[in-house]
Amino acid sequence: MAAPVTGKVVYDQEGVFIHSSCGKLEDQDSLIPGTLRVVEKDMEVIVDWRPLEETLDSSNILCAVKDSSSVVEWNQSPKERNNGGPEHQNSYEAEWDMINAVSFKKRQFTNGGVQSPINIQSKWSFLFSLTDLKSIKQNKEGMGWSYFVFCLKDDVILPALHFHQGGSELLLECLEKYVVLCESEQDSRILLVDCQNRSLSQSFENLHEEPTDSLLQKFKKDPYTATMVNFSKVTNFLVDTIRGTDPLTHRRPPQEIADFLNDAMPDLKINQQEESGFEVITRIDVGTRPEVHRREPVSTAEWESNMDSLGRIRNVDHLKHIIFKGGLCHALRKEAWKYLLGYFPWDSTREERSQLQKRKADEYFRMKLQWKSVSEEQEKRNSRLRDYRSLIEKDVNRTDRTNKFYEGQDNPGLILLHDILMTYCMYDFDLGYVQGMSDLLSPVLYVMENEVDAFWCFVSYMDEMHQNFEEQMQGMKTQLVQLSTLLRLLDSSFCSYLESQDSGYLYFCFRWLLIRFKREFSFHDILRVWEVMWTDLPCQNFHLLICCAILESEKKKIMDGGFGFNEILKHINELSMKLDVNDVLCKAEAISLQMMKCKDLPPAVCEVLGLTDNTSAPACDLAEDYVVRKHYQNSTPPNNPVPALPPNGTRGNSSLKRLPNSVHTPTSAW
Amino acid sequence: MASKSSLLKVILLGDGGVGKSSLMNRYVTNKFDTQLFHTIGVEFLNKELEVDNHMVTMQIWDTAGQERFRSLRTPFYRGSDCCLLTFSVDDLQSFQNLTNWKKEFIYYADVKDPESFPFVVLGNKVDISERQVSTEEAHGWCRDSGNHPYFETSAKDATNVAAAFEEAVRRVLAIEDRSDQLIHNDTVHLHRKPKSSSSCC
């Protein structure tokens, strides 16, 4: 019966309530009154809360289990349990165990199974050992009573306890006899145990909103999504409870916005459906992260030493590697970017390039003439051209205006920016001009200082970025899903937190991805970031690892601060111009090395990064497609095509062994 | 109750380049940046103010105006208390598009009663002398579209900017007062009361 913890009761307080939303089911009263006790037993100190009625039936008492990373609570009535039998229940447990997401396990009690009307309430019972306590969150003043939220070391967050009859201060005094409590630097409402400045992470429990059976069915079909969706549901509930008094975060349910973003971008469900099975969910040890240093930028002398007498670049892999590691000195950019962007074939001779430029200049001016020769009358009947022109004119005046090349009135840079964007509309009228494109062009034009070269380099860059700007913005959707795949591997607890804040679809990274960090770094730094990305090293989608690197650096602030949907968006937006380019690049490279060393990378992650292991087929559609797009500018296929990724053994770095064995060449698609 | 701060969500809509971000920045930071970038994605700023003895935190949302970004912009319309329809007096097209912006807002914000929803209309850039939209035309549209208050603003020289935002707050509070007199229903209340026992979770 009741199985109260026996031992010395050092604190005993009645009138400690849990405010439950379960009430909406049948019972309108959503307050569950209970008693909180602190008990010294053997060498342990136990904190125990149970509802008043608990003395009648404790069969559903829950306790946090050690070694668990997050929490699942079953909402299983005793009746169902009897029907299902004990094996049934055990198999449920086993399934949940496989996802490393266990927590509230039911204790076995001899008198279990008695149908009781207080079942809904009694499921809230909990107890934990004080050694498992990580932090306590207190409410702000002014609520009329205090409430505490206990967070355990395995990031289990227990339901808020509301001290309607007082006694919260006494509890703190009592606990302070056993542990040291100190205020979190980030949030004075959070008391950390033992001054471990660890975050109050918000992973969580409870599937009480859904009947167990249907949930389990979902789980069997798609354990991953079922789990995450329900986690986030419950986390929302608790987070709302925790923040009940904060009008800035509470009033507007961001869930709604998130739902609508999901509707707007249907591919952005919490995770890809094909990732069923247990593999994804199981935590993978990605190993230690190597220390990474960057080198000095590639000098003109180094570049020229890799050019033969006809002006062909030799040792392309080596050159790309040193560009990846250090970038380019500024004087070299005007030439080297043309290769990196695929305007010049690496193996072209001086003569071939000069011919190419001539051809491309003709082609450019033919297209430029097209829009230049549209009369006002014609334009009146061409609303799309009119709209493109109008927006280009506005945006040119709002792009990098602090840069010398574009500052002031009537700066020639502004006219060039305008003309190239207008000509691009003629080059690709279906796409036309979409906001963000001026951001991509501006640095390219700045470096090229030449209208024709800048145009064709921009065309190449746009080939890569095209999908971002299309009507359905497929590129954005794909990248956000890919980013979420990577982030989940690197830091599933952060992912869960973001999901709990309806931010799991990573909308706040939208600007980063749309224009490749153009607004996040200073003009000078973005030149470096882009040339590093354009090497296509050390793996596919390196820019997503840059996202991971930045997010990892911000994780603590976001989680410790308990940032909600709006605050996360604001925080990420405000990182603009505050990022250190070298830190970010080093960290992103280190993550790539870490991942390439990892033996158990999930297939989805390998696919995103273009990594294949020796056993599976090396062909990767994405990589192939990418190479083809990079080269299709050139009117003739190169005789000696450049590999998209360096073949094995080009570098002595064993960590690169996961790179594909076979080299993808554009010829395969010609 | 007046001492309690309410959160008010206000959204700026209008064609690209009419000055939405500049209006927001002028109002919140009292600065005008001629070198401002066009907005990519969605941003917001908070501003605390007192209107008629009500402390209010205004959360001002600013979005990218291009049609292409509609699907990423519209989810943020939900939960808005007021919509600031913005055009530029030197851009006739942006004025003509106000009707579309209003429709888009009503549709995606899921406004229950569009007739009474507070819209405020801002004709920005009045510092520019070459106007394409006259004050009378703008007043006419506002009158015919549901008697929306109209402000001619300049984010550049700060003309009428605060007045327009404060009017937005007044409109919301006025509606709130009206609904307060009705029987309690499921409308969202502006004045957050201390937690009662009815709901918390």
Image: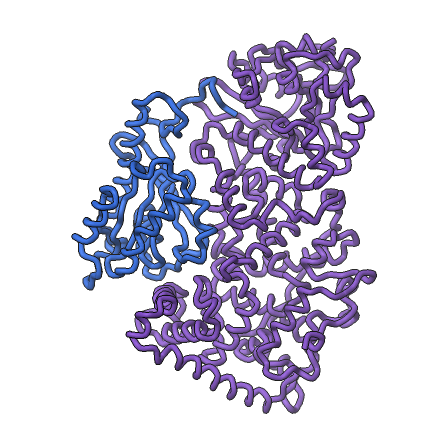
Chain colours: A purple, B blue
Work out whether A314 lies above or below A471: below
Q: Which residue is at a point 41% across and 26% down the rendered structure image?
A: B186
Work out whether A65 lies above or below A576: above
| A266 left or right of B192 in image | right
Q: Quadrant of residue A402?
A: bottom left
Could you say which is closer to the camera, residue B137 or residue A540?
B137
Q: Quadrant of residue A161?
A: top right
Where residue A47 sits in the image (x, y, percent)?
66, 18
- Report the residue that reaches farthest toward the left: B136
Q: Which residue is at a point 55% across and 39% down the rendered structure image?
A: A501
Q: Quadrant of residue A43?
A: top right
Quadrant in which the N terminus of chain A appears? top right
| B162 left or right of A591 in image | left
Count of residue discs? 0
Residue A317 in view in this figure: no
Where residue A240 sits in the image (x, y, percent)?
52, 30
